[in-house]
Amino acid sequence: MGYGTAPKKVVPRVPLRHGEGKKDHLTSFGGLAALSLDALSSVAYGPEAIVLVLAAAGASALRLTLPITLAIAGLLAVLVVSYCQVIAVHPDGGGAYAVGKKDLGGTVSLLAAASLVVDYVLTVAVSLAAGAASLASVFPSLASHVLGLALTGLVVIAAINLWGIAESARAFMLPMLLFLGAVFAVIGIGLGRSHPAAVVGTAMPVHAAEAVSVLLILKAFAAGCSALTGIEAIANGVPTFREPRAKNAQRTELMLGALLGTMLIGLSILIHRQHVAPRGGVTVLAQLAAGSFGTGWAYYATNIIVTLVLALAANTSFGGLPVLMSLLSRDNRLPHLFGLRAERPVYRYGVVALALLAGLLLIVVHAATDRLIPLYAIGVFIGFTISQTGLVRHWFGERPPRWWLRAALNGTGAILTALAAAVFVATKFTEGAWVVVITVPALMLLFARIQSYYTAVGHELDLTGTPPPLTPTPTLVIVPVGSVSKLTEHALSAAVSLADDVVAVSVWPDPDQCKEFRAAWDRWDPGVRLETLVSPHRSLVHPMVDYVRETAKGGRQIAVLIVEVQPRRWRYRILQNQRGLLLATVLRASTDVVICTIPYRLTSR
C-alpha cells in the first residue's frame, strides 16, 4: 500500500459462457439489422403496390399515391406507438399472441399465434423469392436458377441464425446501412432535380379500366399497407435484446418507425413529382433510382443493394418466430422441444422448423413471387388488429392516467388494420388468399389439440397433486452378457453396486456354444448367477425381451443394465455392434422395466 491509497479490491473475473453476457444479445441499433430488415425493405414494394392498384383507374388516379401513403404513414405511427406499449406491458415477447392471451382469451390468442406463424413463414419465402427474382432481372442468365438461389439464401440465413441472433445482426449491419444510404440518396438527389435524369423500362399504356371509387382507394390503401409488415417482429423478439430489454426494444421500434415513415413519404413525393407510372421490366424503385442517378454505376449498385436486402429481410422472421414458438411451447401449445435454448440465446428447433417450412413453400411454388404475394400480409394484419384490440381492453381494465387517450389511439388502429385485413381477404381470396383462410384455422386446431394432449397427460401424471409416500421394493438387475471379458466385468461391477440381486443373462444360438460359455463363466466365478437361453432361430433380442417380461410378472422392480462400447473417435461408432441399442429400444416399447446404459470407453480407437 503506497501513496496513502487504500488497497484495491481485486475481483476475480470468471469467463462467461455463450449467452450469459451482453455480447450475445441485441443492442437497440443491432435490433434494426436483426429484426427490422423486413419492414425497412418493404419500401421496395409498398409504394409500387399502391401505384399498380391506382393505375387501373388511369394515369390521373396516380395523384392519389401521396395522400394514401400519408394515411399509411399515420397508421404506421399508431402501430409503432402501440407496439411500444405492447413491449412495455409484455416484456417477455410474444407481441399480439401475448396481448391476446392476457386480454382477449385463449381462442383469440390461438388466432394471433396461427396468423403470426403463417406471416413469418411467408415473409421468409416472399423475401427470398423477391431477392432471387430481382437478382435474375439484373443478371438474366440466372433466370432459370431462381429456386436454387432462393434455397441457397435460405440455408445461409438459417446457418447464421443457428450461430446466434447477435451474429446475424453483425452480419446484416453493413447491408442495412448501404440500403438506407441508397434509398435516402435516391430521395435526396431526386428531390433536388427538376426532372428525371433517365427513364428506364418499356412504356406501358395505362388505361382506365375502372373509375376512382372508395373501393379502389381502399384496395390501394390495403395494398400499400404491405409496407407495414415486419414492424411487429421487435415486440415478438424482446427477449433477444440486452438489458434493459424493454427500453432497448422500444428504441428500436421508434427508430424503425421514423426511418420507414420517412422513406415511404419521400418515395411517394418523388412518384408524385416525377409522374411515375408502371413500366415494363422495372420496378417503381428502379425508376426512381434512374431518375436520381441516371443509368450509371450508382443505378446498378442501388438495384443490387435492394436485391440483397430483400433477400436478407427473411432474417426478421428468424428473430421473431423462434421466440413466439418458445412461448407457445411454454403454454403447452407446441412440443416442449421448441422451448429448448442452446448455450447461445438461440431457439434452434424454431430456427430449423422455420427454415424447413419456408423451404417447402418455396419448392411448392417454385419461388414464384406472384404466387406468394396474394397470401402475404393477411396474417400480420390479423395480428395487428388483435394487439390493438387487446390493448384497448387492457387500458379499460387498468385505467392508468389518460387511459382514454391510449384506448382511443389503439381503437383507431384496430379499426384501420381490421379494415385492411378484410379488404385483403376480399380482394385476394380467389388469387390464393383462401389458402391462408384454411391454414390459420388448421393451425389453431393443431395448437388446441397439442394443448389438450398436455392437459390430459398432466391429469394422468397428477402434476399438481402430492404423490403417496415411497415404498421401497427389492430390485433385480438383469445384465445381458455375451462373453467373459473386461466389458462384462465393467457391467457387472456397476450392477452389483446398484442392487444386491443381480443376474447375468446370455442368449446363444447353439447348445454347444452355450455349454462352452457356461464353463468359462464357472472358471471365472464372478459371484453373479448366470442364466443361459438357447435360441435356435438365432434371434438374440426377442428371447431376452421374453425373459425380462416373464421375470417382471412377479411385481418386482426390474432394471436392465446394457453396456455400450464408446470409441474415442466418433467415426468408429458405426463399426460397433448396435445390438444393445436395439435391445433398449424394444424393451422401452414392450415393457415397463428400468433401462440403464453404461458406456465402456475405448482409449486406443
Image (tube, grey):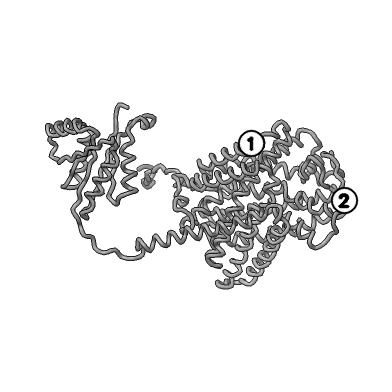
Q: Residue furthest front?
A: 536
Task: Give the CA distance from mark 1 to mark 2.
Answer: 36 Å
* Mark count: 2
Instruction: Quadrant for the C terminus, please.
Output: top left
Of pointers 1 and 2, the one earlier in the residue sequence: 1
In the foreground, 287 or 356: 356
Instruction: Quadrant for the N terminus, please.
Output: top left
Image quadrant assignment for residue 306: top right
Residue hosting label 1: 149
Residue 478 position within the rendered picture, expressed as x and y whole percent measured from the top left = 22, 44
Q: Establish if 88 lies above or below 159.
A: below
Left or right? Give the position of 118 relative to 544. Answer: right
For residue 582, the mark is none
Q: Residues within 10 Å of mark 1 (few under 14, many from 20)?
A: many
Amino acid on which disc 2 is placed: His
Amino acid on which disc 1 is placed: Leu
Residue hosting label 2: 207
Q: Residues within 10 Å of mark 2 (few under 14, many from 20)?
A: few
Residue 453 appears in the picture as rendered:
yes
Q: Residue at x 76, y 37 (%)?
A: 299
